[in-house]
Image (cartoon, rainbow, N blue to C red):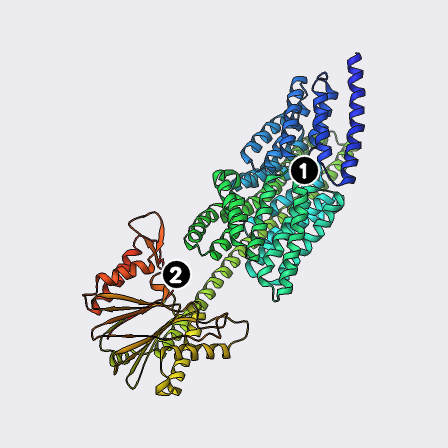
């Protein structure tokens, strides 16, 4: 008896101390004092008698802790003590709290096991409210495990139980879960509707923590819509709801909501970075993302939430990439990638949906195209597996079916009651008419009784008529339900038609764009020297010209002025349309330079200097686009040639001897060396000598070597030199065929073209 009283007094004392520590932690803005105090409180309590007071203290400890591992530790202790005391309700509460903690740590299977155990106990206790809470939590877990069919079923079970109980707050929680589910399916209007339902429901209860989550899910729907249409107005709407939600979360001091909203705001600003029109706005955006990321990080440290810390690190990696710190971001990305892949069942959503977009940016910036290709292909498989619209259609049909079956059951019950009443009325009428037959014999004696029976019959007939009218009204309601279902089916058909029309529109637009680009290719091809002109200038030559896209940033140019024969290859900045535009400008400029040049001025350096001057003159000061080039001017009279190179070399084979003329390490563009003139290097030649000039696309082709068949490598200038040395005894026509076949063999076994740039090589026999 003494120990029981002592434990109760100790419990009161510990609650007072806990309250004091909580107040200190809140005023100081830290939780380390609170957590350490709770741990020390356990060391005192573990030697106390195992009774209800000790169980209550354990419950307070795991409710008051922020650290996830500590919460699991104390909730398990509470469960074991409750089990020893045969307190089923406390056992179920501890199991639910443990399951919620594992769910926060993304250990979904373990979390589901604890919630199923808790659900079994609540079912035995016939506590429908707690059953509904378990179904709600299991729905979230099944959604994380990609079992959407089961998740949707659990959501509806929870919703039905909460509606029966009139639990408005938890009905709002179910609406939030459904909003999150439809947002995952990219059915954003439905996701918004559920989020608005949740917001309307939770506003009635003034639950700021719930309202903050409602506003966050509404913002998530708009942010997902922005990632589809990239409209600035949509992004601002998403941010407006995030800021409102953050304000509500701070009012309720709800750390989990502050973390989620801080991370979403950080992400929204990083999404806006690419849309910034000025450097000042870009800095403001990065500063805002840093502010909200740090706000979330402070709360993450308080809770010790590893999963949310990963999300913060992922956002921070994108921030570093935007600042140009590619190596620093790459180290962090590769570290998280290894962790996620090692436990993909736990971190699948983090790996694909959060780290995935940042990995794409990193691989693209670091030019690791193979890793980028592999991840995109893997992500598409995950996307097809996870976001299956069949679940959405099944859910809509299931919801309509449930509503219809509910109303139909109600109608069946009412009709059954009406039929019973009608049968009773028929029996009564039979008795009445039988009794009236008897009364006819005794008419004079039973006239009073007859009058009373007549009145009773009249009343029953009126009731029967009223029942008939009610049945007619019910039938009308049933017809309206069928009409509603028919209208919904028509709406789905109209949406499918709209999707098909949009698909056709995109197809026709794509065809028109490709046709325009192909026409541009014809114009570009016509502007370069024709094969007939090349044969006129050079008796023996070969040309390899393979654009990466329809139009090319690489181009070749040739001309003849008196005894001077001129040949050049040029690699413009970029490829495709952007490179093609710059190449057209280069061809026109080169033609103009030769047309205006005096005969004594013609040399390779003069051509490159004039071309660079024209590019600088015709572009803005902040434009550094230009081209790499190699130009060779052949003096047929004096049997020598001059070469000037901008990042591109010239290879000269004379009597089997290889000679490489290196280029200057500057491009034909604005930049650090724009005021430094190109120089011309001269060399004598003999008849039959061969020269080769080419762009980097010829040697940067990725392929698989015999030395290391598991790793992609560039073909490289070294391999090209060895190839040319080995085939010098062949004619130029045969050489061209050997080079092309060698490059094709180098790419053999790859799933797509491994080239990363346009290809251009010109060889001339002098």
Percent coordinates x, y for residue 134 in the rendering: 62, 33
Image point 41% across, 81% down: which residue?
588
Of marks 1 and 2, which one's residue comes earlier in the chain?
A: 1
Q: Are marks 1 and 2 in contact (CB under 8 Å)?
A: no
Give the spatial CA distance, label 1 vs label 2. 59 Å
In terms of secondary structure, where does tag 1 sit?
A: helix
Q: Please name whichever residue, 537 or 549, is drawn nearer the observer in this view of the structure.
A: 537
Instruction: Report the side of 178 relative to 546 (left or right).
Output: right
Report the front residue among 442 and 7.
Answer: 7
Q: Position of residue 714 (x, y in %)?
A: 35, 56
For the residue pair 581 and 597, the one nearer the viewer reads as 597
Task: Give the label on residue 206, or none.
Answer: none
The answer to whether residue 288 shows anywhere in this view is yes
| Rendered image: mark on residue 162 | 1
Residue 512 appears in the rendering:
no
x 28%, y 67%: residue:
659
Residue 737, compared with residue 6, is above or below; it is: below
684 on left or right of 473 = left
Displayed quadrant of residue 428 = top right
| 39 to the left or right of 605 | right
In percent of width and height, residue 226 lies at: 59, 58
- Please state if 568 lies on the left or on the right of 625 as rendered: left
Q: Is residue 644 above or below residue 39?
A: below
Q: Quadrant of residue 224?
A: bottom right
Q: Which SS class for mark 2?
A: loop
- From the viewer's perspective, is residue 659 above or below residue 424? below
Q: Which mark is residue 756?
A: 2
| Neighbourhood count class around disc 1 (C-alpha, 10 Å): few under 14, some 14–19, many 20 upward | many
| Residue lying at the far top of the rendered structure | 1
Whether 380 is drawn above or below 68: the answer is: below
- The residue positioned 80% from the left and 32% from the top of the image is 20
């Amino acid at each position: 008896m003494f120990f029981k009283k002592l434990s109760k007094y100790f419990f009161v004392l510990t609650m007072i101390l806990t309250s004091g520590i909580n107040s200190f932690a809140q005023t100081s803005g830290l939780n380390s004092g609170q957590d350490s105090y709770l741990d020390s409180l356990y060391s005192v309590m573990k030697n106390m008698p195992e009774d209800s007071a000790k169980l209550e203290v354990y419950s307070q400890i795991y409710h008051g802790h922020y650290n996830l591992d500590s919460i699991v530790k104390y909730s398990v202790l509470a469960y074991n003590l409750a089990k020893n005391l045969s307190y089923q309700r406390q056992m179920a509460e501890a199991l639910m709290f443990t399951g919620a903690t594992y769910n926060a740590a993304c250990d979904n299977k373990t979390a589901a096991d604890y919630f199923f155990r808790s659900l079994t106990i609540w079912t035995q206790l016939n506590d429908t409210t707690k059953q509904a809470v378990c179904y709600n939590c299991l729905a979230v877990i099944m959604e994380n495990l990609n079992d959407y069919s089961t998740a949707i079923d659990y959501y509806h079970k929870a919703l039905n139980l909460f509606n029966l109980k009139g639990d408005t707050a938890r009905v709002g929680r179910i609406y939030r879960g459904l909003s999150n589910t439809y947002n995952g399916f990219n059915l954003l209007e439905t996701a918004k509707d559920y989020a608005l339902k949740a917001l309307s429901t939770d506003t009635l209860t003034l639950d700021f923590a719930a309202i903050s989550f409602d506003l966050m899910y509404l913002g998530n729907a708009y942010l997902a819509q922005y990632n589809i249409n990239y409209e600035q107005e949509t992004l601002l709407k998403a941010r407006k709801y995030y800021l409102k939600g953050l304000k509500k979360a701070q009012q309720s001091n709800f750390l989990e909501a502050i973390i989620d909203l801080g991370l979403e705001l950080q992400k929204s600003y990083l999404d806006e970075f690419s849309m910034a029109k000025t450097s000042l706005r870009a800095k403001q955006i990065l500063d805002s993302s840093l502010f909200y990321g740090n706000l979330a990080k402070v709360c993450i440290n308080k809770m010790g939430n590893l999963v949310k810390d990963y999300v913060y690190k992922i956002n921070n990696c994108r921030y570093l990439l935007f600042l140009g710190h590619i190596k620093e971001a790459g180290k962090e990305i590769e570290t998280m990638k290894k962790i996620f892949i090692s436990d993909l069942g736990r971190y699948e959503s983090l790996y694909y949906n959060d780290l995935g977009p940042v990995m794409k940016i990193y691989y693209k910036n670091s030019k690791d195209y193979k890793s980028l290709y592999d991840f995109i292909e893997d992500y598409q498989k995950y996307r097809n597996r996870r976001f299956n619209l069949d679940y959405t259609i099944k859910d809509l049909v299931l919801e309509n079916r449930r509503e219809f079956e509910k109303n139909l059951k109600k109608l069946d019950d009412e009709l059954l009651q009406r039929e019973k009443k009608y049968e009773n009325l028929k029996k009564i009428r039979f008795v009445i008419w039988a009794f009236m037959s008897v009364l006819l014999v005794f008419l004079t004696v039973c006239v009073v009784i007859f009058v009373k029976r007549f009145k009773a019959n009249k009343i029953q007939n009126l009731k029967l008529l009223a029942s008939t009218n009610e049945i007619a009204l019910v039938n009308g309601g049933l017809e309206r339900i069928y009409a509603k279902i028919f209208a919904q089916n028509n709406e789905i058909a109209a949406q499918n038609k709209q999707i098909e029309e949009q698909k056709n529109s995109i197809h026709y637009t794509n065809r028109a764009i490709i046709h325009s680009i192909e026409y541009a290719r014809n114009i570009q091809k016509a502007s370069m020297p024709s094969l007939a002109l090349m044969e006129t200038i050079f008796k023996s030559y070969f040309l390899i010209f393979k654009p990466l896209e329809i139009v090319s940033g690489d181009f070749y140019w040739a001309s003849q002025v008196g005894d001077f024969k001129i040949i050049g290859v040029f690699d413009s900045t970029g490829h495709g349309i952007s490179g093609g535009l710059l190449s057209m400008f280069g061809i026109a400029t080169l033609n103009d330079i030769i047309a205006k040049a005096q005969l004594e001025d013609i040399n390779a350096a003069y051509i490159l200097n004039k071309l660079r001057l024209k590019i600088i003159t015709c572009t803005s000061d902040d434009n550094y686009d230009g081209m790499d080039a190699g130009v060779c001017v052949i003096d047929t009279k004096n049997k020598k040639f001059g070469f000037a190179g901008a990042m591109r070399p010239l290879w000269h084979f004379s009597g089997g001897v290889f000679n490489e003329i290196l280029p200057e390490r500057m491009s034909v563009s604005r930049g650090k060396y724009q005021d430094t003139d190109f120089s011309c290097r001269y060399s004598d030649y003999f008849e039959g000598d061969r020269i080769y000039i080419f762009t980097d696309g010829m040697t940067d082709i990725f392929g698989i070597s015999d030395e290391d068949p598991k790793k992609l490598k560039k073909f490289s200038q070294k391999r090209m030199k060895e190839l040319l040395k080995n085939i010098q005894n062949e004619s130029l026509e045969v050489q061209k065929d050997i080079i092309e076949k060698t490059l094709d063999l180098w790419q053999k076994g790859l799933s797509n073209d491994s080239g990363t740039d346009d290809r251009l090589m010109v060889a001339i026999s002098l």
